[in-house]
Image (cartoon, rainbow, N blue to C red):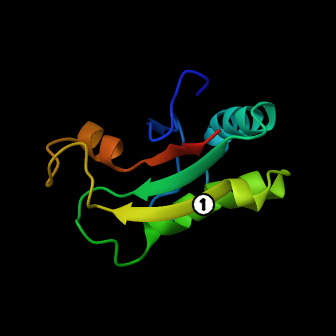
Amino acid sequence: VEASKVGDVLEIKNLIFKESSNIILQESKESLEDLLQIMRNMSTLKIDIQGHICCQRYDTHKIALSRAKAVYDYLINNGIEAARITYQSFGGSRPIFSMPELSEAQQKANRRVEIQIVGF
């Protein structure tokens, strides 16, 4: 993040949710803690949390939005000011791999949460 500039989009690696839900699995704790520590260390950093889904263009159940909000809530609940964070969903409108995906690996790549650097 330190080498990033405003507008850069970074994937939160190893952020895993229970299937079809916004429940963050325990194995994601380290990734969330890393993001939290970055936000604490860079006290002027502002980010937009962006949720994406796989397998379909439209997120009729708003899973991507609820996952982005789960990350937002985690940061807020751990002391990061709400004014520094926004969140939104892109559903399936910005896939890394074209849909329908050809493998589970492609689905996993499309099913992600990213942060965009909004300001420093």
Vertical order, 35 against 87 (above or below): above
Residue drawn at point x = 34 percent, y = 71 percent: 59
Residue drawn at point x = 68 percent, y = 40 percent: 45
Q: Amino acid at mark 1?
A: Thr
Quadrant including the C terminus: top right
Q: Please indicate whether residue 117 sits to the left or right of residue 76 in the image.
A: left
**Which quadrant of the view contains residue 52?**
bottom left
The total of numbered circles placed on residues is 1
- In the picture of the structure, the residue carrying the numbered disc 1 is 86
10 Å crowding of disc 1: few (<14), some (14-19), many (20+):
some
Camera sees residue 108: yes
The image position of residue 4, as x and y in percent, is 52, 27
Residue drawn at point x = 44 percent, y = 37 percent: 8
Vertical order, 101 against 90 (above or below): above
The image position of residue 113, as x and y in percent, is 47, 49
- Residue 95 or 24: which is nearer the viewer? 95
**Which quadrant of the view contains residue 55?**
bottom left
Vertical order, 56 against 24 (above or below): below
The image position of residue 86, as x and y in percent, is 60, 60
Residue drawn at point x = 34 percent, y = 64 percent: 91
Considering every residue shown, the one lying at the far top of the view is: 3
